[in-house]
Image (cartoon, helix red, strand yellow):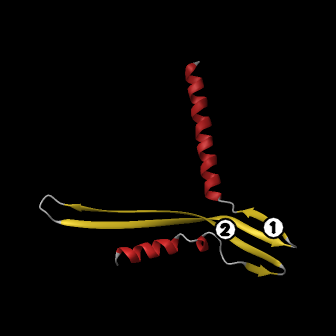
């Protein structure tokens, strides 16, 4: 695979089609899925101590659901996706922070 093919694939991976899904219509209601997409890439070349050279490149794309646009009776409403894992981790971290702060206050007395 040459560099142009890699760039073409990366460009396809980060287009608007990755953010907004195909509209789904049922019973007069249209739903458009929405995602948050992150991407990055890099590359480089180099030469070793004995004269050999090489190059490499790579990229990555990460997507997660953000919610849906609901279109009903000419009105548009955004319904966010609920990320249960993120809520649980946040609650766990906040609980740990409260626990640590209480422990420090008791030691100071």
Residue name at image x 56 percent, y 71 percent: 15
| Residue at the disc numbered 1 | 76
- Asked where in the image residue 76 lies, by quadrant, the reply is bottom right
Q: Nearer the viewer, residue 65 or 49?
A: 49
Q: Where does the N terminus fall, quadrant-wise?
A: bottom left
Q: Where does the C terminus fall, quadrant-wise?
A: top right
Residue name at image x 78 percent, y 76 percent: 30
Q: Residue 49: where, in percent of width, then height?
A: 14, 58
Q: Residue 98: where, in percent of width, then height?
A: 62, 36
- Asked where in the image residue 19 lies, by quadrant, the reply is bottom right
Residue 33 in the image: above or below residue 108:
below
Question: In the shown orientation, is residue 2 left or right of residue 61?
Answer: left
Identify the disc placed on residue 4.
Answer: none
- Spot the residue most to the top: 109
Residue name at image x 38 percent, y 67 percent: 58
- Spot the residue most to the right: 73
From mark 2 to mark 1, how far is it between C-alphas?
14 Å
Q: Residue 97: where, in percent of width, then height?
A: 59, 37
Q: Earlier in the sequence, mark 2 or mark 1?
A: 2
Query: Disc 1 on helix, strand or loop?
Result: strand
Q: Nearer the viewer, residue 17 or 86?
A: 17
Query: Disc 2 on helix, strand or loop?
Result: strand
Question: In the shown orientation, is residue 54 left or right of residue 20?
Answer: left
Q: Do residues under tags 2 and 1 come within 8 Å of each other at their CB atoms?
A: no
- Spot the residue most to the left: 50
Residue 84 in the image: above or below residue 108:
below
Q: Residue 47: where, in percent of width, then height?
A: 20, 61
Question: In the shown orientation, is residue 49 left or right of residue 16?
Answer: left
Residue name at image x 46 percent, y 75 percent: 9
For the residue carrying disc 1, how many other residues have a C-alpha within 10 Å: few (<14), some (14-19), or many (20+)?
few
| Residue at the disc numbered 2 | 34
């Amino acid at each position: 695979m040459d560099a142009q093919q890699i760039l073409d694939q990366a460009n396809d991976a980060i287009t608007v089609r990755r953010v907004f899904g195909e509209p789904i219509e049922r019973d007069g209601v249209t739903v458009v899925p929405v995602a948050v997409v992150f991407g990055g890439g890099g590359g480089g070349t180099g030469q070793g101590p004995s004269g050999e050279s090489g190059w490499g490149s790579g990229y990555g794309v990460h997507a997660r659901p953000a919610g849906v646009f609901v279109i009903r009776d000419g009105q548009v409403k955004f319904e966010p996706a609920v990320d249960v894992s993120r809520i649980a981790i946040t609650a766990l971290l906040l609980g740990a922070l409260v626990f640590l702060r209480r422990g420090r206050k008791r030691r100071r007395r």
